[in-house]
Structures are given as structure tokens and as C-alpha cells.
Image: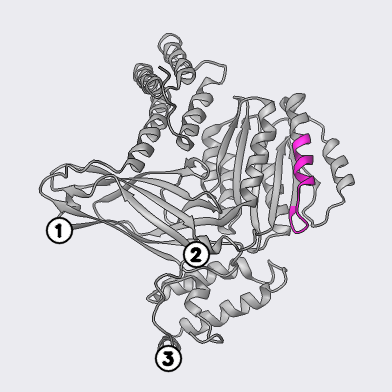
Amino acid sequence: MPANKLDYYAMLGIFRDASQEDIKRAYFELAQRLHPDKNEAPGETELFLGIQQAYEVLANPKRRNLYDATLPPVIKDDSVVNHEIIFSRPSLVKVNEPQLIYALLDVSAREETKKIPAPPLNICLVLDRSTSMQGDKMDMVKATAIQLLRSLRPEDVLSVVAFSDRAEVIIPAAINLELKKQENNIQMIKTSGGTEIFNGLKAGLTEIRRALTPLRVNHIILLTDGNTYGDEQQCLALADEAAAQNIGISGMGIGHEWNDIFLDALASKTGGSSAYIAKPKDIQRLLVDKFNALISTYIDDVILEFKEIEGIKINYAFRLQPDVGTIDLVSPMKLGPVLRDTPLHVIFEFVVDPSALKTDLSTLLNGSLKMLMAAHPTPVPPVRLNLTREVLEESSTEPPPIRILSALSRLTLYRMQDRARTAVDDGDFDTAARSLNNLATHLLSQGENSLAKTVLFEADNLEKMKNWSAGGNQKNIKYSTRALLLSGPKEKKI
């Protein structure tokens, strides 16, 4: 393509065979992000005008045909990422009952594109300052917030919101902050009142929007030690708004009083993650780790768009790295970020109905991966994702690839505790205890002796007391089995 010839399809982030509906949707999504009324960063007005020009040409069938005639052949290797799919088995079997098959998706940065400078940050810390945060927890939160403030690059934006039953902007979103003044503002945060997360999130989202631009990594980090009551649905609606503007939300819970199910749901809507902070001393490490991960972001979010296929159900999707977390099973599916040195790994569980096995080749998923990338405010080329398996009369004797077998082995541990929690919620304590005893056996076989003891204690408690213990073991088990997904099993000592 000549240097002065614009690729309108690339500008809209769509394939050349995109339908008129695809073109219209892509344009409106970009207009939301790049409209001059919402973004005032240098150069964004020109970007918006380019997007508008691309839409005007491609939305008109006659102009599109004339434009298409001038295009060179499609360059097959123009993606900014490498991607790979590993299946748990090479084929499906013609049987009269549903069968499971797993697929591991690996998305990583291409080596030559890692040289692109890291994008600036637009981060808001939304900090719980309710009465229960007093003491070591608040002292550590304030010290870490000041540490992050001092580590900002000149182009980064950091805002801080403190909330209880009302919210207060401690540091407004701005570049080149007056450090001494803002450090004093953080030190002056006092604890009081109850926990109403909606107020904090709403104020945090407002601050993020002040510096919102697709040229930055835009993210809210929520830190709380308590439950929020009555405003969960409002919070989840805010998360939907944030996701539409490519604003991530990650939640961190301190201690054992907070609602992990709620924080998981909040984060998964935006491709973010949730974390468990067992002790105040861990606040600094986890907050700094999260901040550093945001700095090393390569792809802000990988989004899977797909249409349901008759007889095929995505039964489960889980992100194994860079942040471990659940994924909403709706299209578009926000899979999460790709870091410069850490690929995105997502495992899918498909349930295949016999009705999907009528031909020699079964399609499990037909869709595309879209990448949102702060270093490229306009869309990068999407990637087609067409997952198919042969359908044979007899099952293959080929063993599963080691990578997916290892991932499934560790994911099984996490799902065992998940099944135990579901059984407790249903009042089936015997089933819950059996699940935990089974989990403990597997943990012992992998050398996780300390965690196995905690699990056995909780299984015994469920049998006797018909409830979880009050010491936080429930969250410890959940997040410890999650952590195992990021590391291999320990070697057993002889």
C-alpha cells in the first residue's frame, strides 16, 4: 500500500469482509473513545477525523467497492501479537452424550513490537477509609500511596479517592503534581464511617475520566476491607460503563470481611482482577506489584467477539496469567491484558452436544480477537479465531499436551474449592466436606502441605459446625489455590 494510502479497515479495527453492521458498530465504539468532546489530548481530534473519513467511505457500498479495488493483497503477518491454541485432545468422538474438550489460548507480544515505549498511566486509587481500616491497615495504605506517588513518571496521572459512607477526592487527576502538598493530603486521611463502595467508585471513575485518553492505560485500583450493602448492582453498572470506555477495575480485599464474589464480578466486567490481602504488611507488596504490572502493559485488553454455535457451549473460561481471574461468558468477552514479558493465558471448557457432531469437522468457536492498545490509539488489526476439531468414530490415544495438562491439573484444585463453596451455599455440607477432603489429598500429593492442613481443618469444621470458620480460611483457600495457577506444583521432599 502506498505510504499516503490510508487503510480504512485497519483504522476501524475490522476485517476486509466486515458486514455493514460490523462497520457501523466499530465506528460508534471508536467515536465513543475518540470524540473531541471527551478527549482533549494532542492529536486526538485528527484521529477522530480519520475514523470519521474511514466510516464515510466504508459505510457507502459504492464508495467502498471503489476503495477496495485500490487495496493491495492482505498482509497475513501484520498482527501486533502472536497467538497459539492448544487443545486437550486432537479430536472429538461420535457419541450420543455431551463431551468436554479444553482449549488453552496463548496471546503474547511480538518481539519486534516490544520496543514501542511503554504508554503513560492514568490510575486512580480508590481507598476505603471506613472505621475498620484504622491502625496498621490505613498506615500501610497511606505509606504505599505516597510511594506510588513518588514513583510516577512525568507523563503519568495518579488520582486518589478516599471513601466511607461518602467519597472525597484526596488528589485530583493531574500531571506534574505538587508532591509535597499531595503527600500531606494523603497523610491527612482519617478513618470514619461505614463502607459504601459505590460512592468511592463513582468518584474514582469521575477522576479517571478527567484524564481519559486511549493513549494511556486507564485503571482504577479499589482497596477495601469490608462489605458494601445495597449498592452492589449500582457498582456493577458502573463497571459496565468503565468497560465501555476501556477503563479497567481491579479490587483488593484486606482481611476476611469483604465480599470476594462481588469483587470478582466487578473486576471481570472490565478484564481486571481481584486479590486477597491477608495481613496489612502485604498491602505494599501487592499494590506495588499491581502498579508495576500496569506500567508494563503491552495490550490493555484482549477482547473475544463470537457468536454462539448450535450444540456448542462455552461452559467455563478462566484467565491463568498475567492476573488470575474469572471471565464473563458473554460476547464481547474481556480476556484481560498482555504484558510485555508476560503473555495472556486463558483456558476454555467447551461442552459439545451430539447434535454438533454431524459432520467430519466440528467448529467449537468462530470469532475474532480485538486488541486495545494505548501505544496505538486507533485499532490494531484483529485476529481471526476459528477453533475446530475433527470428529472420529473412536477416541484418540494421543495424550494431552503437557502444557494444558499442567494447567488443568492446577485449575482443578481451584474448582474443587469452588464446588465446596457452592455446596455450602446450597446447604449441602457433606458434599462440601468431601470436596475439601479431596482437595486436601491433591494438595498433599503436590507438596502443598500447609494449605492442605488448612483445607482439612475447614472440611472438619463444615462437618461439625455446618459453616465456614470465622478466621478467613475460606478466602485463604480460594486465593491460595488461585495462586497455584501461576506456579507449578512443589517438588516433594524425600
Q: Secondary structure at mark 3?
A: helix
Residue located 15% across and 58% down the image: 360
List the residue tagged with mark 3: 66
10 Å crowding of disc 3: few (<14), some (14-19), many (20+): few
From the viewer's perspective, is 27 left or right of 101?
right
112 lies above or below 347: below
Residue at the front extreme?
Answer: 494
Residue at the top extreme?
Answer: 464
List the residue tagged with mark 1: 359
130 lies above or below 148: above
Q: Position of residue 363 (x, y in %)?
A: 25, 57
10 Å crowding of disc 2: few (<14), some (14-19), many (20+): many
Badge 2 amino acid:
Val
Frontmost residue, 195 versus 254: 254
Q: Quadrant of residue 439?
A: top left
Frontmost residue, 445 versus 222: 445
As measured in the structure, the alpha-carbon distance from the residue carrying label 3 to the one carrying label 1 is: 39 Å
Residue extent of the magenta highlight = 142-157
